[in-house]
Image (spheres, coloured by chain):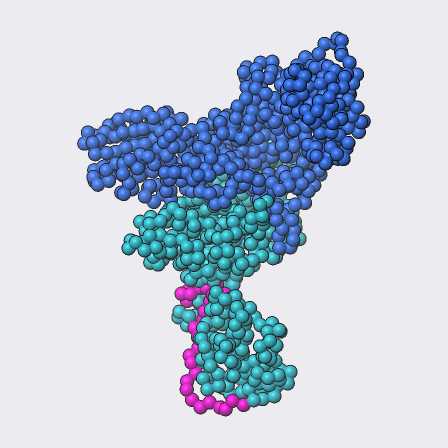
Chain colours: A cyan, B blue
Amino acid sequence: MRMSKLFARTLREAPAEADVASHKLLIRAAYIRKLMAGVYTWLPLGWRTIRKAERIIREEMDAAGGQEIRMPIVLPAEPWKATGRWQTYGELMFKLRDRHDRELGLGPTQEEVVTPLVAAEFTSYRDLPVNLYQIEWKYRDEFRPRFGLLRAREFLMKDVYSFDRDDRSMGASYEAMVDAYRKVFDRCGLDYRVVEGDPGEIGGDVNHEFIAVVSVGEDEFVYCENGDYAADLEAAMARPPAPAPPGDRGPMTPLDTPGRSSIQSVSELLGRPPAEMLKCILYDAGGRTVAVLIPGDREVNDDKVARVMWPAPVRLFEEDDFKARGLVKGFVGPQGLSDDVTIIADRSVRAGHDWVTGANAADRHVTGANLDRDFRVDRWEDVAQVREGDPCPRCGGTLGLARGMVLGHTYQLGTRYSKPLKATFVDEDGTEQPYEMGCYGIGVTRIVAAAAEQFNDDGGLKLPKALAPYEVVVIPTNMDLPAVVETAERLYAELAVLGLDVVLDDRADATAGVKFADADLIGFPIQVVIGKRGIESGKVDLKARATGERRQVPLEGAVQAAQDLLAGAP
Amino acid sequence: MRMSKLFARTLREAPAEADVASHKLLIRAAYIRKLMAGVYTWLPLGWRTIRKAERIIREEMDAAGGQEIRMPIVLPAEPWKATGRWQTYGELMFKLRDRHDRELGLGPTQEEVVTPLVAAEFTSYRDLPVNLYQIEWKYRDEFRPRFGLLRAREFLMKDVYSFDRDDRSMGASYEAMVDAYRKVFDRCGLDYRVVEGDPGEIGGDVNHEFIAVVSVGEDEFVYCENGDYAADLEAAMARPPAPAPPGDRGPMTPLDTPGRSSIQSVSELLGRPPAEMLKCILYDAGGRTVAVLIPGDREVNDDKVARVMWPAPVRLFEEDDFKARGLVKGFVGPQGLSDDVTIIADRSVRAGHDWVTGANAADRHVTGANLDRDFRVDRWEDVAQVREGDPCPRCGGTLGLARGMVLGHTYQLGTRYSKPLKATFVDEDGTEQPYEMGCYGIGVTRIVAAAAEQFNDDGGLKLPKALAPYEVVVIPTNMDLPAVVETAERLYAELAVLGLDVVLDDRADATAGVKFADADLIGFPIQVVIGKRGIESGKVDLKARATGERRQVPLEGAVQAAQDLLAGAP
């Protein structure tokens, strides 16, 4: 490709709205252009990077036994209603009606398509397992698209679906995919962690996230200092403290606390630390009242509460709920809550006693509230938000907190979709069984964003060579000297013959400085520079973009030297 | 690929709704499955065929200087309103609103995206020409989707857009694309014609359609027996007859024709042929009345009338229109039409005289109506529907009529989009000029449908080898004989090592008959059959699917013989 023809105009400045490095640089380097909020056009440079990521993904999916198919983007609503996701996705799903007034959606994932598809074709246990994948655009109508490709409304995803006969076989299919995913991200040259994840709208049980470590990431995850545990913050657990030993307990005593409805203010009044207060948070779970107990120094993780109460929809109490159910906001305690309230306690509540908590009356608290004697717990669950410094659930080591962006997500779905969609096969014993499913996604456009976020400097992008749109740029610096131009043309032709992805910066009206700056900004892994002095001395300058390493080599061996430098580049 | 793993279950019967051979066979051979009306899932076999077509297209587009980009599917409404296509597409375009109530559409083509994109990047005449293409799914909410992939609502299209500095350069870009299109369809092995086309909703002037000749095609085209002219029926012209020589004309005489409002009935009453009647068809063109004159034995081509009156929207008169404008349906004649009626006559009207036509009163006609003396013509145009047997506009030879399906369409758009979208570049003289554009489309999914329609027999599909999902199938007929299975496995491995796309039909529970039938139905170009008798005699049977040619070859040379047979296959 000749730079003079390439549909790419680099920009000195990123648009003001570009808020993270990857977004700024991908626009400045002419990889992408915005069409509207969260929706981008891919220019030739960016699209080549996408196609390289696609090729890596296809090779690894095929090697792992995947078969490529292609499912529609525009989908009928009915199966989404059967699984309940038409409602749970809600406004996140783009919805429309066709001219015959039929309800349609744009697919955010495709379980509702692939499950009936397989059920119609592979009807015997002998057909299983089967693993089907596609690479296709997906849609989420994000309320606030931002961070460029990180939270887009249209994004390219590789989605795989596995169908197995039983749980054990499904586990094996799952492991094979996790392994293939590691190979994909390794080949892309990304810095990532595999963490235990939150299932979100997809559902299911075991799941893992492949998170690229980037400081601007929207996803927080915890990791153990000893490396034996990592999890998405929404799913992370800490080892619960040891239960309080039995012993004397003080009496439960009421206390006036006028206007003191917060943990902090009661703590100050009594001179006791927040950890000795018992917070009682109220939720509505499909019409039922749920009280969640947690020590005053910790926060409840709403995602965990939602999982505990699934499939009931869960929301925090609002003002009206308190009034309607005769409870006093800011002064609720678990003692004396009626039997129709489900009381869930975080496991850490076992470690305390003689709690300070609300007295269920305005401006009143109690001290000395004790489990069993003064209040009951219906269910013990892990509902606490993990904090930096908490003990690891595996080894007790210290947990740290980091940010990243999710590149891939793997789920053991079990029968979450096959049951409501009545997708069954005939097992060996003649019975109809629902498929045990797994689903797996890779954000292809996110791979590009993550690579841009992880590999850049003040000069621009330095994508790994596996993803860079071209591998080598040949830069003649003096376009008015025929010897320079001819030598550059010759090297360009020789590199192309060797099968390298090579660009010749043949722009006659660009200065050497502009060419160097563009080469750095776009991030060609290897730069081959031919100038007047080089021609006179028979030398060519090579530069490896990622490391900054420079070599001056004889013109005669320049092609081989460029190949060698590329082979050693990240 | 092993047939026992391939996600493909062939069907003995096509679903009742499948109405054409390609649709029936693509479903029976497990290439596609229907999700809903006009929307299909591509199974592994079909998807491989699509990917092969894509590769051919990419290679030819790149060779012709095209640069691949990727534009969004979900598009903002505003630029579509600027070009007027938001309205002209109407219900044909899928429309939706996002959660912030912004109007969006699913792209049927992408002029409204690519034009502003280029205008923002390539702003100087020195940047031009540029040619950008993409391969992406397109959407049309057809009122009645049918014929499987022929009239689908979601379809894969390769669209190219060229931007030039002036008309001459645009013409050169256009010729290069037409040439590249010929190469694509030649490589796909299709039987097609290049015909002059109707611009439809796209607009512009010169355009050509690449039509696959198939009897079930929705598109009719005419062609000259001498090969010098071919055109879509909607755009086709015939040589007009010679004008009538001057001479005596009879007087215009009114005549009672009670209840005879049709050409046929008046013709019978008077004993004069329909060719001597003058039809006067009324249209509303944006509120204005248009009368179209044509001899009674010919039909008006509404598409031509719409083009003549463009950009005014044109529709035939309805009952109310006749009443509102004081005209009598079935008895309209051009004489005495008021000045605010535009009278357009087909060029063939020049050939007649002493016309019989309506008297503009109920149950009355006139005879002896003559041009100029009795009625005026405001515009002479070609508005007649061409018929089989008409004279060729180029050479006067006889025109024939055939059916086909449009695979590709190329358009010289000129400034049809760049002007309303204010997409300009700075020309050499410093003035701002709108780009001269071309646009070009190939229906990728239609290529598969056309190939299936053109290449099949009672046994199933016989796609050209360039498009067939696999090139060779190895069929062991006796799965209980280890020597047969081992030999088949060895040939399968050897063919794969040579880089051929090969399938081993290793199904243990399928009879030889089932394997032969599936191989024919799916249409593997070469079948390599290994059975008991062959093993005993050291022979292998080869069959070329397209020609039915069979060869028995020695086992030792079987791989080479299969390759040779494939090389000679269509």
Q: Nearer the viewer, residue B149 or B357?
A: B357
Name which residue lies at 41% across and 35% down: B25
B24, above or below A124, in the image = above
Quadrant containing the N terminus of chain B in the rendered view: top left
From the image, give the main secondary structure of the stretch colored magenta.
loop
Find the magenta span and give its range: A225-253
Residue B89 among magenta residues = no
Say how many tags the image has. 0
Residue B181 in view in this figure? no
Name the image quarter holding residue A477. top right
List x then y, in percent, for residue A455: 53, 52
List x then y, in percent, for residue A48: 52, 42
Q: Which residue is most to the top?
A: B247
A446, above or below B487, in the image = below
Name which residue lies at 54% across and 84% down: A356
Q: Nearer the viewer, residue A100 or A195?
A: A100
List x then y, in percent, for residue B519: 34, 35
Q: Nearer the viewer, residue B117 or B361?
A: B361
